[in-house]
Image (spheres, coloured by chain):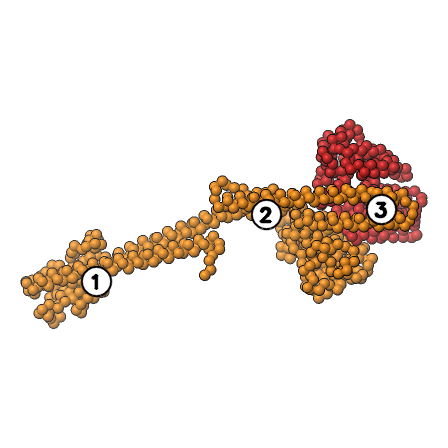
């Protein structure tokens, strides 16, 4: 069985069950009352029959015929429900016929029924309307036939009333179910908006946001208190991470700075070419180490999404053109073609980060393909996304290794001898994710095609 | 403008740095370049200096005990100090740099750095006209036979027109505005390309070689000197290498 997992689904299910219960109860009520009233009518007819048979035995057929004429169309005192209907719809009808079937008395039963009980016998009421009655027919000792019928109108009216009550009840249940579904949904929605608003703030890098409470002590307040405690903890961890990062930065960079100064000082004072060369190498090695360290911290920083606070509306096309122009001579020098097809696309982002991401993609081509290998850059708006692809015509990457290219310190060169730290594409991914986009390897026949998708700002939203 | 002695301009420099070795090293090296240096190890004292005397430039370490460099700068700015300021910091984060520049600094240098880098940046900052007073309203830059018209965006060398790409034009303009001064690779990346990061590819070198080729076309002397490991310089005197 499928259990609904939404508020709406649960409400509909519960209203449905309530409605079903009402229906069953109503049907039972109709069934029971119907039979009860029918039994009452039968009982009345039997009592009349007994009385008239006794009267016939003592007074004879002519006296009976007189009685039948008098009583036909009148009412008798009913019991139970029938007693309360004040005569409406509980007319009693009588007919008397001789042994040949010729009518002696009684006019309201047009067609005489066979002997015994007849459930639905057509009749005429004293006011002339047609109806249906329950009838009992008996043979007298001389072969003549006495028919006594009770109008079923009271019965069908009782059925109708119960049915109406049941339908009204069903309507009320469905209505309150709908109203409470909507009201409940609104309540839940209002609280969820507060929670998701806070979550969005956190995603965008504002770790100080907390979910507001309304003091009602409701389930939402209680879960909000717990979520806020969790946010407090995340905030604390982020702050301590930043603290540790800046402490490391200070405690590592300050002594390295001193070493660098000493090396520089030695270099300035030295006149020995070999020594100067060694010192330059040492400084370069230290700078490379620092670069790795800065790169790792930088990726973590971008992943922290603090930059989102500074995002502005900017032309991604201009950023791409700037980078392409900056790298064109470097590509020319290695006899590489650099073709670009750039559409105007606007995004919400940070120019420096986007520049860095695109530059890293081009540097990736320069670092990992042979001289002379060209690259195609395209920027398009694809529905609501700015899609940038950088497609080189090198040897590409085996499919089974493609997943790893965005991981930190992953290098596909097993000897790890090529320059670089394997941070370039990790930084690209961190930057793209900070822009709520994604980066992936596109299937291609030749080389490597990397694709960045970032939510674009629709053109008609740009008028401000 | 064409005074060759300009490079030995004496600047009054306030140096705030809590690490004694670094402070001594920087102070000594700056003095060797002919500058007057007032060095302090503590924020409050440095702030007091900015209030009592005028400096051509402030060199402030960001992380010092007590008042940190950024706060000193903020308070000094509030008190009316307009001297250009450069923040030195071991905090290399992207956000740290943004906070530094938004906090009123004119430049932000991450430790450790080459002394030549600091010296070059100080030189460029000191030549920057104070805000509100665009001293370089002149629309013509002229160094050693190279003439740049900033309005018409044309360049001539010894009367010969030179056709430059926009980025090459900006590159030459920056060099012409800083004649006889070392201009480093990272300064150019920052000012000409607006790259707040250091790419692995030598963007500057590749553009520079094209600019040089165009300038030297026709057998002219090489005007832009490369100082190995540090940067570039356009020279005003004879002595072309």
Same chain, marks 2 and 1? yes
The residue depicted at 48 percent of the width and 46 percent of the height is A219
Cα distance between the residues tagged 3 and 1: 118 Å
Cα distance between the residues tagged 2 and 3: 45 Å
Which one is nearer the viewer's eye here, B174 or A242?
A242
Check residue A318 in the rendering and tell me which mark sits there, or answer none: none
Residue A205 placement, left or right of B21: left
The residue depicted at 40 percent of the width and 50 percent of the height is A176
Q: Secondary structure at mark 2?
A: helix
Check residue A133 in the rendering and tell me which mark sits there, or answer none: 1
Which color is chain A depicted in? orange
Which one is nearer the viewer's eye here, A151 or A230?
A230
Which color is chain B depicted in? red
Task: Look at mark 3 in the image and give the residue it sits on.
Answer: B230
Q: Residues within 10 Å of mark 1 (few under 14, many from 20)?
A: many
- Label 3: chain letter: B
Task: Look at mark 2 in the image and give the residue it sits on.
Answer: A200
Q: Residues within 10 Å of mark 3 (few under 14, many from 20)?
A: some
């Amino acid at each position: 069985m499928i259990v609904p997992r939404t508020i709406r689904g649960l409400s509909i299910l519960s209203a449905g069950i309530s409605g079903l219960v009402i229906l069953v109860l109503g049907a039972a009520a109709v069934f029971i009352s119907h039979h009860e009233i029918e039994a009452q009518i039968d009982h009345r007819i039997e009592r009349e029959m007994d009385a008239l048979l006794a009267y016939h035995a003592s007074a004879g057929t002519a006296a009976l015929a007189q009685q039948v004429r008098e009583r036909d169309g009148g009412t008798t005192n009913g019991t139970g429900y029938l007693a309360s209907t004040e005569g409406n719809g509980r007319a009693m009808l009588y007919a008397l016929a001789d042994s040949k079937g010729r009518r002696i008395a009684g006019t309201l039963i047009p067609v005489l029924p066979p002997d015994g009980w007849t459930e639905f016998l057509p009749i005429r009421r004293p006011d002339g309307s047609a109806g249906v009655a329950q009838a009992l027919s008996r043979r007298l000792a001389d072969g003549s036939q006495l028919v006594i019928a009770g109008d079923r109108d009271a019965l069908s009216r009782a059925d109708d009333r119960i049915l109406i009550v049941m339908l009204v009840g069903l309507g009320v249940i469905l209505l309150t179910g709908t109203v409470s579904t909507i009201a409940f949904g609104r309540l839940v929605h209002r609280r969820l908006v507060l929670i998701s608003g806070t979550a969005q703030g956190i995603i965008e890098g504002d770790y100080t946001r907390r979910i507001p409470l309304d003091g009602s002590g409701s389930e939402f307040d209680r879960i909000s208190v717990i979520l806020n405690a969790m946010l407090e903890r995340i905030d604390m961890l982020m702050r301590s991470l930043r603290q540790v990062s800046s402490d490391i930065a200070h405690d590592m960079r300050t002594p390295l700075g001193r070493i660098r100064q000493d090396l520089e000082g030695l270099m300035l004072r030295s006149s020995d070419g070999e020594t100067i060369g060694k010192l330059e190498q040492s400084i370069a090695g230290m700078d490379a180490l620092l670069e790795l360290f800065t790169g790792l911290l930088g990726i973590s920083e971008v992943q922290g999404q603090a930059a989102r606070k500074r995002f502005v509306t900017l032309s991604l096309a201009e950023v791409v053109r700037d980078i392409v122009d900056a790298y064109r001579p470097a590509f020319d020098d290695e006899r590489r073609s650099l073709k670009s097809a750039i559409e105007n696309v606007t995004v919400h982002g940070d120019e420096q980060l986007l520049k860095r991401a695109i530059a890293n993609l081009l540097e990736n081509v320069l670092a990992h393909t042979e001289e002379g290998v060209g690259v195609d850059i395209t920027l398009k708006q694809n529905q609501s996304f700015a899609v940038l692809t950088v497609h080189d015509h090198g040897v590409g990457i085996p499919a089974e290794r493609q997943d790893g290219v965005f991981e930190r310190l992953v290098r596909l060169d097993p000897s790890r001898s090529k320059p670089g730290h394997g941070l370039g594409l990790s930084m690209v991914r961190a930057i793209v994710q900070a822009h709520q986009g994604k980066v992936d390897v596109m299937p291609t026949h030749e080389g490597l095609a990397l694709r960045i998708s970032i939510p674009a700002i629709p053109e008609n939203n740009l008028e401000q | 403008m064409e005074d060759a002695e300009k490079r030995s301009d004496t600047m009054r420099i306030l140096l705030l740095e809590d690490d004694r070795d670094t402070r001594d090293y920087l102070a000594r090296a700056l003095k060797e370049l002919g500058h007057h240096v007032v060095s302090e190890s503590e924020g409050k004292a440095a702030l007091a200096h900015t209030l009592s005397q005028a400096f051509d430039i402030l060199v402030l370490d960001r992380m010092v005990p007590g008042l940190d460099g950024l706060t000193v700068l903020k308070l000094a700015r509030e008190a009316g100090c307009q001297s250009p300021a450069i923040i030195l910091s071991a905090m290399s984060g992207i956000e740290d740099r943004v906070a530094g520049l938004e906090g009123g600094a004119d430049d932000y240098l991450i430790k450790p750095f080459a002394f030549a880098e600091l010296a070059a940046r100080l030189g460029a900052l000191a030549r920057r006209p104070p805000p509100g007073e665009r001293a370089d309203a002149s629309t013509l830059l002229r160094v050693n036979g190279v003439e740049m018209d900033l309005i018409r965006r044309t360049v001539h060398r010894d009367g010969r027109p030179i056709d430059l790409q926009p980025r090459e034009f900006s590159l030459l303009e920056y060099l012409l505005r800083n004649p006889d001064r070392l201009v480093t690779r990272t300064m150019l990346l920052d000012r000409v390309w607006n790259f707040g990061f250091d790419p692995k590819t030598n963007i500057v070198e590749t553009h520079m070689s094209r600019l040089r080729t165009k300038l030297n076309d026709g057998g002219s002397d090489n005007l832009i000197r490369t100082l190995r490991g540090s940067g570039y310089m356009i020279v005003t005197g004879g002595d072309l290498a």
